[in-house]
Amino acid sequence: MGLLALGTPLDWDETKPLAEHIRYHGISQFLKTWDRWKDNTGKGLLWGDEIEYMVASFHDEEKKVLLSLRQTEILTKLQSVTLDPALDKYKPAGCNAIPTFHPEYGRYMLESTPGFPFSGTPSSLVSVEADMRFRRQIIRSHLKKHELPITITAWPRLGVSNAIFTDPETYPDPESSSSKSNYVGQLLTNPHARFPTLTANIRQRRGSKVDIRVPLFIDENTTIPEGMNASISNGHATPAKPEPGTPYIHMDAMAFGMGCCCLQITFQAWNVDEARKVYDALVPIAPIMLALTAASPAFRGQLADVDARWNVIAASVDDRTEEERGLKPLKNDKYRIPKSRYDSVSLYLSNDERNKPEYHDVEAPINADVRKRLLDHGLDDKLASHIAHLFIRDPLVQFSETIDQDDELSMDHFENIQSTNWQTIRFKPPPVNSPIGWRVEFRSMEVQLTDFENAAFSIFIVLLTRAIISFDLNFYMPISKVDKNMQRAQERSASTSQSFFFRKHVFPQDKPLSRFDLNSRPVSPPNNPSSRSSSTPVSPINSTFPNGFAAASSSSSNQHQRENSSRSSSSCSTPIEPENIDESPEMSIDEIINGDGENFPGLMGLVNAYLNSLNVDVCTKCDLRRYLDLIKYRAKGQLVTPAVWIRRFITSHPAYKRDSVVSDEINYDLIRAMDEIERGVRPAPELLGKDYVGSGPTGCL
Ligand code: ADP
Ligand code: MG
Ligand code: MG
Ligand code: MG
Ligand code: MG
Ligand code: MG
């Protein structure tokens, strides 16, 4: 949760002179935490998701759906400590904590987190979906009859010119709103002082309004602006950033990006070293999961030629000056900065010897003073550089009441910089005065239509982190390749039509485990309760690799798996020499997730191997299999991404005129359909498979 303390926000001219003070004390605060926590361990794996919703307001007579701006009212009810007894029936067994609800940037947005973080045991993973649905039911119970919470990443008609898209009506105010947007008004933004101040200070620091451009999807009747080159977008997608002279959708406010919804996962590591290792391993995973969860094919009332939000949100908070962006020679500013504050990770963080210098092949400016201070305090180079890279940024929001802080008791100045570095992965130090330890947050995924999907992706990421730790996996590859993948991940239909760089040799070289060994004897950090149960040996059938877990569910595939297993164990006894081949070649998402059928087991193979190393009962395995299958089949292209589904819905709607326009009528039917799919009253086997059961025909209480 961001800083939401109340106070008097300073404007940019008042904040800028405080930047050095805030950074200096931010580092002092971090060092206090470092001294307290560097050798401390957390309480083992605890993790939780954050799901963001938009509140849709339906106007059936006019076939219109608008964004409801009742966030403040709704949150007041949601944050009351008691739970309506009528909701008890939705409460998952074993759930003792009332879920938590948070404000978000858009005044039409809500965020939920579990009331208490989950553990990582397979049986508790099975109840994640129920917890998510419980939260959705609680939200529903506080909405008006014509309102529904929708987990949609980007609202297709947000910011359409000369149209009403909010309830109540709002109008742009380019003169006096904090964004000065020509498309969205002040009332779209959360009224808490932090948000308008953030918006205005980003714009003022940058020296101009933010400038967001995504390529337009060109159809037969699309209006092409004069002087632009365009040909019909056919099978082949264009790059995720518009090429010069080609038509694009223009946006000019923070709301277009920070007003998108996503799915984030935070988990507590055993200690700081484990957090750093998992952080690094997840860096190359971020673009893969962005492609698989892509859910945003339309912006400002038009179809885009991208499927995901990332570049939109990166540009929406890009506070870099012209000097920092390299448009002018450096004179007043200190650094050339290649990326927005919201972008992919530029530096790996672990002290692992496998984290080689050659992987750091993108420009990552460093605050040299900060780095020196951290090194002088005894921190190692990797951690010092990570923090020093975050600390090239200026603070954006400061309240006059909290300029002077007790560095023993506060992390606010540190968090001021940290929480406005919105990277794909976030390394979260322990809060002050709290038992919470070192954590890592996975931030690239788009929110899914259903909690079944949201649970599936959350569970998959959590299990993958367990596999990373248990098997000491190596996913390192050059950051430049990760950055390329980030762009590819946003292209139209990327998960089936693009290829992605990924490391093929993921097992530790000094531990040449055969596949069977891998299953029966995972490497677990000593005294780590989060992986303690993984030392239990398992039966040979269930430990086949990479698909042995799937084999447990049907006898015909058992046969196949046995054959598979004998093949793979023989091929694995020959060690592979990674030196002479491209360490991280291009692969399809299917190969990256499901394996190449030869030496690379795929991320699912690794997750399966981890599960096989645990003593999981058959019921729990079958329950988990439902979630993992969603990812497996989506990676194969047998199930579509939400972006593909939404785009198809729009382009096959009877009112669609082949002009790229998402009209009110189409949007109304789309959002209705999304709600019906979530509740299971409208089948969508192409998206969810045949067995999906929704939250029920009435949905509301
Ligand atoms: P932010 O918005 O700063 O990313 P939130 O507070 O909204 O953070 O969400 C944090 C998530 O971290 C929640 O889902 C919570 O359940 C989870 N979490 C992970 N580990 C812990 C822990 N040790 N203690 C508390 N929460 C944790
Ligand atoms: Mg949050
Ligand atoms: Mg937050
Ligand atoms: Mg959030
Ligand atoms: Mg494209
Ligand atoms: Mg978060």
Image (cartoon, rainbow, N blue to C red):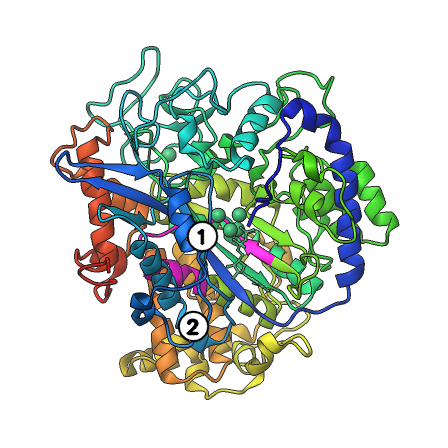
For label 1, the crowd category at 10 Å Cα-Cα, with few meaning under 14, some 14 to 19 and many 20 or more, is many
At 38% from the left and 23% from the top, the residue drawn is 183
Give the residue furthest to the top: 227
Q: Quadrant of residue 618?
A: bottom left
At 53% from the left and 64% from the top, the residue drawn is 47
Relative horizontal placement of residue 699, taking residue 614 as reference (left or right): left
- The residue singled out by tag 2 in the image is 95
At 34% from the left and 59% from the top, the residue drawn is 138
Q: Which residues are magenta?
A: 440-459
At 75% from the left and 56% from the top, the residue drawn is 33
- Between the residue at mark 1 and the residue at mark 2, the CA separation in whole angstroms equals 28 Å
Res. 584 visible in picture: yes
Disc on the earlier residue, 1 or 2 = 2
411 vs 172: above or below: below
Which circle marks residue 289 in the picture?
1
Question: Which amino acid, by three-letter code, is at mark 2?
Answer: Cys
Front residue of 701/23: it is: 701
For label 2, the crowd category at 10 Å Cα-Cα, with few meaning under 14, some 14 to 19 and many 20 or more, is some
**Residue 446 located within the stretch drawn in magenta:** yes
Tell me whether circle 1 and circle 2 mark residues in contact (CB < 8 Å).
Answer: no
Q: Nearer the viewer, mark 1 or mark 2?
A: 2
Relative horizontal placement of residue 138, taking residue 275 as reference (left or right): left
Residue 131 image point, x, y percent: 39, 66
Res. 545 visible in picture: no
Residue 119 image point, x, y percent: 52, 72
